[in-house]
Image (cartoon, rainbow, N blue to C red):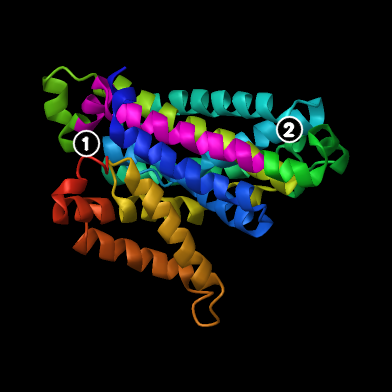
Amino acid sequence: MEFWRSRSLWITLIVLMGVGLWPVATGSATLREDLFLIFMLIVLASSLNILLGYTGYVNFGHIVFFGLGGYIGFYLMHRHGWGLWPAMAAAGVATAAMALGLGAIILRLRGAYFALATIGINEAVRAFVTNFEPFGGPTGMSLNFAVYDAYGGPARALWLSYGTLLALALLTVGVSFAVKSSKFGLGLMAIREDEDAALVLGVRAPRWKTLAYALSALFPGMVGVLFFFKNGNIEPGDAFRLHLSIETIVMVMLGGQGTVWGPILGAALYERLRGYLLTSPLFKNLHLALAGAFLLLIILFIPAGLIGWLRARFPALRRMLA
């Protein structure tokens, strides 16, 4: 396919791979944990960008796929003894199938109505899981430490989780690039610019935006399994954090929606900023309010995000920063 010959794609993947292998080369557990969170946010932001950036539909409930996928995979490992990778694959397929069914219904809505519906879905799924006894109810589930023996023990399982996450982040970014470079992606961007005009021009908007919604749900479902496997337990409050959906939107907007590099840059910068705010005595209780203010400033002053600003200021970067 044509996109595989893109220099921009390979530069992006090589940079991510180089950064991702840094903790492996140094053996630093602290750096591994820092980058684990950043790569997880890259997966969430890049997958959200498939819907928000390419199609223009603002999804405040993106985290529902992270939480539900985490629960499905955790349940398969906890109750049925599945391995990590089969559980991740099953959870990703399940969340994508759920999004396919939901998308056929809620994507008939547009604008604020769609955004409000996605919030409702997140809260409804959280209420269901909280009262669903096979998933542990309000207390969730915990893994027996003996589970990690199959992966060489807890310490090696942490490195395995990190390596798996790095591979998943590279896959998510590659798929995002492939979508943007395809006829499918052009159709999604036509929907973003003017959905009615796209329909007139022959774009199958209902089908294509539903497929985009399902594809954007695949990767959060998988990374949710990985995150809770690493933690060893899962609870409704941790799995369906609405504020993380809002922060993911900030990441996409900060870096530049509709670009491949935007969610990557936005996730890395926002996580560094959030880390500072959470450890600051002055701002630790205000980081969500500041995130909202930050989003407003981005929309007002740099609506194209940092990547859009860089491409406008330095034209030579346009071919490198997809």
Answer with the quarter of the image where residue 140 lies: top right
Q: Which of these two is toward me, 100 or 320?
A: 320
Residue that extends furthest to the right in the rendered view of this protein: 146
Answer with the quarter of the image where residue 209 lies: top left
Sequence-first tag of 2 and 1: 2
Q: Which residue is mark 1?
A: 192
Quadrant in which the C terminus is drawn = top left
* Apparent side of residue 301 relative to residue 40 in the rendered image (left or right): left
Mark number for residue 273?
none
In the structure shown, which secondary structural element does the residue marked by tag 1 occupy? helix
Return the x and y of residue 301 as percentages of the image width and height.
20, 63
Q: Range of the magenta residues?
A: 161-189
The residues bearing labels 2 and 1 have C-alpha atoms spaced at a distance of 37 Å
Question: Quick one: label 2, few (<14), some, or many (20+) residues within 10 Å?
Answer: many
Q: Which of these two is toward me, 10 or 279?
A: 10
Tag 2 and tag 1, C-beta contact below 8 Å: no
Queried whether the magenta region covers residue 155, the answer comes back as: no
- The majority secondary structure of the magenta stretch comes to helix
* Amino acid found under the numbered disc labelled 2: Tyr
Residue occupying image coordinates x 28% and y 49%: 256
Residue occupying image coordinates x 37% and y 52%: 265
- Depicted 166 relative to depicted 72: above or below: below
Residue that extends furthest to the bottom in the rendered view of this protein: 282
Q: Which residue is mark 2?
A: 75
**Residue 92 seen anywhere in this rendered image of the structure:** yes
- Depicted 163 relative to depicted 175: above or below: below
**Residue 140 seen anywhere in this rendered image of the structure:** no
Residue occupying image coordinates x 40% and y 64%: 291
Residue occupying image coordinates x 81% and y 41%: 143
* Apparent side of residue 108 relative to residue 76 in the rendered image (left or right): left
Quadrant in which the N terminus is drawn = top left
